[in-house]
Amino acid sequence: MEKQEIQSKSHVLAIPVPAQGHINPMMQFSKRLASKGLRVTIVIFSSKVLKHTRRLGSVEVVTVDFVSYEGKLSSDDYSKQFRAAVTRKLPELVAELNNSSGHPINCLLYDSHLPWLLDTARQLGLTGASLFTQSCAVDNVYYNVHEMQLKIPPEKLLVTLSRLPALSPLEITDLPSFVQGMDSESESESEYSLLLNHVVGQFLNFREADWIFINTFNTLEEKAVNWLDSQRSVKPIGPMIPSFYLDRQLEDDKEYGPSLFKPNLDGCMEWLDSKETGSVVYVSFGSMAALGEEQMAEIAWGLRRSDCNFLWVVRVSEKKKLPSNFVEESSEKGLMVTWSPQLEVLAHKSVGCFMTHCGWNSTLEALSLGVPMVAMPQGLSLKKR
């Protein structure tokens, strides 16, 4: 079938979770679909990106004003408000796009963390496709929890878990944090239950979706992918990073696209240019991970005493946790920025290693660019990575 004929029949509407780590892979997948001749529109519910329709290459980007996700998806109120807003707005958007584009939408591509969108797709007469943005190994763990093959919490006396298919034997502490059981010191029972139900809820209608896509690739997770595929058909489509850093099949695809953060470009790349090859430690813990003051201090003094050059991304909300005068006293060896063009940084010859929170996007970027990682897992499911 000719590309033009495919395009005339297919229009995909993509909806990511409004968090940078979810927008990025959805945006890249949208670009890939568009390159195959499909018409693709991505809708971002956020108050932090441009509030008008625009195009990014072949993908139409529509932004809808909504309070941005900033690690608040665990809030019951936020989740309910987001669901209500999307459910209310989506039929209007579909009607508007159908009228304006001349190509009726026939597929809803949604983040796996928004499984209720499959019901909306059915109500609108659309097919539904789910994109899982985490590793397939983590997907397998959550799937087994959903299917009640893994008890929550696991028996504390069981030292090694060998019953999870397609995964190496695991210690309890290797499991995603929500599978280990509630941390009574930091979580209420209701909050823990909400978080667990959210991540496991990705599989509520796992078998009903028309397609399941996973941001991974067979060479990296062949056994995990094959096992999940035996439960129902899944398609690995990763790594979803800009084509410039992979196969260069997409023209002018060097950036992800819409960003909730403003990269600090003032002197960042020039500073890297001034450093010797492989001499810089790049430190970034993503868009949501929040470290404690003691952790921040340990990292700060570790970097200082290593006598290595370092580029450290510290979000504005985290700056107050830095030791007093650390920025000024470390200026000879280190550069602190509030956000960075991470792919450009990782691809730079002066970067010798990447200290990371093990977010899946960051992990795939480092693997794709061949940058050694120092792992400091943070967040929902990162230990398993």
Image (cartoon, rainbow, N blue to C red):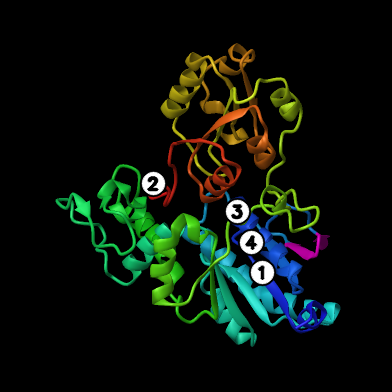
Query: Which segment is the magenta one?
Result: 52-63
The quadrant of the rendering that contains the N terminus is bottom right
Q: Residue furthest left?
A: 157
Which numbered mark, 3 or 1, is in the foreground of this view?
1
Sequence order check, earlier mark of 3 and 4: 3
Q: Which residue is mark 2?
A: 383
Q: Secondary structure at mark 3?
A: loop
Q: Secondary structure at mark 4?
A: helix
Badge number at residue 26: 4
Q: Amino acid at mark 2?
A: Lys
Are discs 4 and 2 less than 8 Å apart at CB? no
What separation in Å lies between label 4 and label 2 (alpha carbons)? 23 Å
What's the magenta bit mostly, secondary-structure-wise? strand
* Residue 74 in view (yes/no): no
* Residue 368 in view (yes/no): yes
Which numbered mark, 3 or 4, is in the foreground of this view?
4
Badge number at residue 76: none
**Circle 1 Cα neighbour tier, 10 Å, few/some/many (<14 / 14–19 / ≥20):** many
What separation in Å lies between label 3 and label 2 (alpha carbons)? 20 Å
Badge number at residue 19: 3
